[in-house]
Image (cartoon, rainbow, N blue to C red):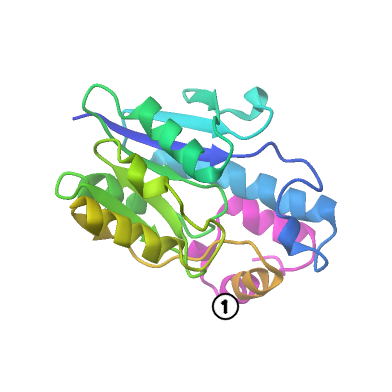
Amino acid sequence: MKKRIAVFARRPEPGRVKTRLSPALPADLACELYAAMLDDTFETVRQAQADSRTVFWADVPDTERSPVGFYWHAQKGAELGARLADAFDTVLVDGAHAVTIGSDCPGLSPAMLERALAALDRADLVLGPATDGGYWLIGLRRPAPMLFEDVAWSTDSVFSQTLARAAEAGLSVETLPLLEDLDTPADLARLVSAVARGDLAAAGPKLRAALQSMKLLPAL
């Protein structure tokens, strides 16, 4: 059984990524943090055991940032649900299992990705719930477009709505540990506090270095 990992990413451009971190951070520093998280995400995916890895770029694909050994595609669809459905149509071929993640979950680890892929040997759907009510990972072993239709994206009900759709469709579900995305100044404050207390697993090395360069963290 082929195991595949897909990453949803954006080209790091000031004013177009992590805009909710403002006004706590100016646009250029928010972009710097996103670029660091993106690099950490790619490295985490590279380290995880999988048969293939694909980046789905929003807007203009940043082919120069696509890591060696990763496939890349442009996201297709007017809204997130359509783009997710299209991505799964792309990677769920030849009987493969696949998980899709974003690029702004600082606590992501290779082991967690491997756990998600292993869960698809038992369940139709695997979800990694996020503290904001969404999910940081979704995995499927066959296309399920009904999961992405009429969802109130970017709200605190995304995870619960997805579970309800799965139940309606008769899909078996396995959930992963709760993780936190980095979207808001409050998220940033909690992350900095966790790393300062010595929880290095809370953020990858590129993100920790970026926080140090901004004087948000002391040298560790």
Is 141 drawn above or below residue 166 in the view shown? above
Can you give x and y, in whole percent of width and height, for residue 139 in the image?
A: 32, 45
Residue drawn at x 40%, y 68% is 178
Location of mark 1 (residue): 197
Question: What residue type is disc 1 on?
Answer: Arg
Number of residues whose C-alpha sits closer than 10 Å to that of mark 1, classed few (under 14), some (14–19) or many (20 or more): few
Percent position of residue 102, x then y: 51, 47
Q: Is residue 186 magenta?
A: no
Residue 109 visible to an observer of this rendering = no
Residue at 75 percent across and 49 percent down: it is 32
Q: Quadrant of residue 166?
A: bottom left
Q: Vertical placement of 135 versus 190: above or below? A: above
Label 1 SS: loop
Q: Is residue 105 visible?
A: yes
**Residue 164, x across and y down, in percent:** 31, 62
Residue 87: x and y in percent read 44, 32
Q: Is residue 148 left or right of residue 93?
A: right
* Quarter of the image with the N terminus in it: top left
> Which segment is the magenta one?
192-220
Image quadrant assignment for residue 210: bottom right
- Residue drawn at x 27%, y 44% is 117
Q: Quadrant of residue 142?
A: top left
Q: Seen in the image, is 81 located left or right of residue 89?
A: right
